[in-house]
Amino acid sequence: MKSIMTLHLRTPLLSMLMTAAMLALTAPVQAQEAKEAPAVSRETVKEKSDAANKEATPAKAAEASKEAVGDAGKIEATASEESAKADADTEEAPVRELTDEEKAAALSEAEAITQYDESKVRGMAKPWQHYYQPAASPVMEHLEALHDFVFIIITIITITVLALLIYVCVKFRASKNPVPNRFAHNTMVEIAWTVIPILILVAIGIPSVRAHYKYTNNQDIIDNPDLTLKVVGHQWYWSYEYPDHGIAFDSNIVADKDLKPGQPRLLTVDNPIVVPVGKVVRVQLTSADVIHDWALPAFGVKQDSVPGKLSETWFKAEKEGIYYGQCSELCGKFHGFMPIEIHVVSEEIFDAWVAGAKLKYANSNHLQLAMNAY
């Protein structure tokens, strides 16, 4: 019995040892087969792929080739066009230096353009003037129309109230009515004096809002100008810049002793502004010290220039001529010596002035405080 039990115990042990030995002997072979199997599989796949590519139709191959060549040609043509365009944009024509005679002629022409001519004066206040200066811009035309409309309304109101007062004074005088009527309320009268003023305010408000937002402060017009003029207020003179043309200068009042025959006192400046007729001019304003106000009555422009703030307005002069304005904000003791002078000319004359102004104001300081002239 003991021998049988020993045999049963030894048999599983021998079986386990034999299984382990067989696994040890076959493991290298299985590993080698595992390594070779993927390699054979990859080679087979590659051979099948090459065979499939060879079996592709020549027409498809030719078509693919044509498409590739066509795309390459298009890309190359586009690249050539862009390169040529870039070269044309970057290539600058050689700038010819002006001769001394040409510079002198340009300067002389620019000076002649800004010379005072009494026959060209359009925007200037006159003695005993009781109405606006002649409108020279769309904004001023609409402001005048609004003024006339409101003037008619207030005239009707004034006449109506005056007539009612006269009627009351005559009809209800003490000699005719020794015993006055004693009543405190009248429904119809109270409705009338409430509704009628509301209708009047609405009638005035609608054209006022249209004039303000559609014309005076129309941002679409301001954002799409033909010309930009930068204005800086100083105590007590103006500085101007044409950023589109590279021109900048100061504008000071001309003292009484330096005025030429016919030039208006307190309005003439040494360096006036020149703008083309019929063009939208965007005006950007600020101040270097205190609050000033750039006002041109004939153009309907009156805009504060505030330190640290950039304000914008616009005008479009529709008539050639000379126009004057002044600072309209109390800015100090020489507030009354900050005039504005604008010459509105044709586009050809404006171009000629630009050519001379670039030479006149290049590398020079035209600052001469107005206060020093008095």
Image (cartoon, grey):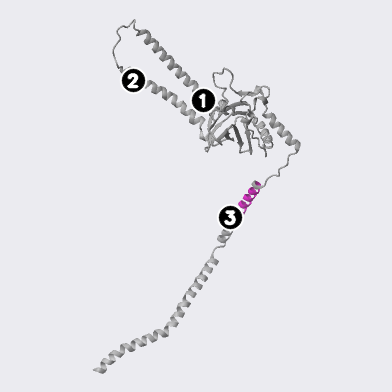
Kindly identify the residue that appears in the image at 39 percent across and 84 percent down: 23
User: On the image, numbered disc 3 is attached to which residue?
Assistant: 71
Query: For this view, does 223 lie left or right of residue 276?
Result: left
Question: From the image, which quarter does the N terminus lie in?
Answer: bottom left
Which comes sooner in the sequence, label 2 or label 1? Answer: 1
Q: Position of residue 153 (x, y in %)?
A: 45, 19
Mark with earlier residue (2, 3): 3
User: Which residue lies under the disc numbered 2?
Assistant: 191
Task: Work out whether residue 369 or residue 247 is closer to the camera in this orientation and state it.
Answer: 369
Q: Distance between the residues labelled 2 and 3?
A: 82 Å
Which corner quadrant of the image does residue 296 belong to?
top right
Q: Determine the CA span between mark 1 and mark 3.
A: 62 Å
By secondary structure, the bulk of the magenta-drawn segment is best described as: helix
The picture places residue 278, in percent across and down from the top left corner, at: 60, 30
Q: In this view, does 68 lie above or below 22?
A: above
Read off the residue under disc 1: 143
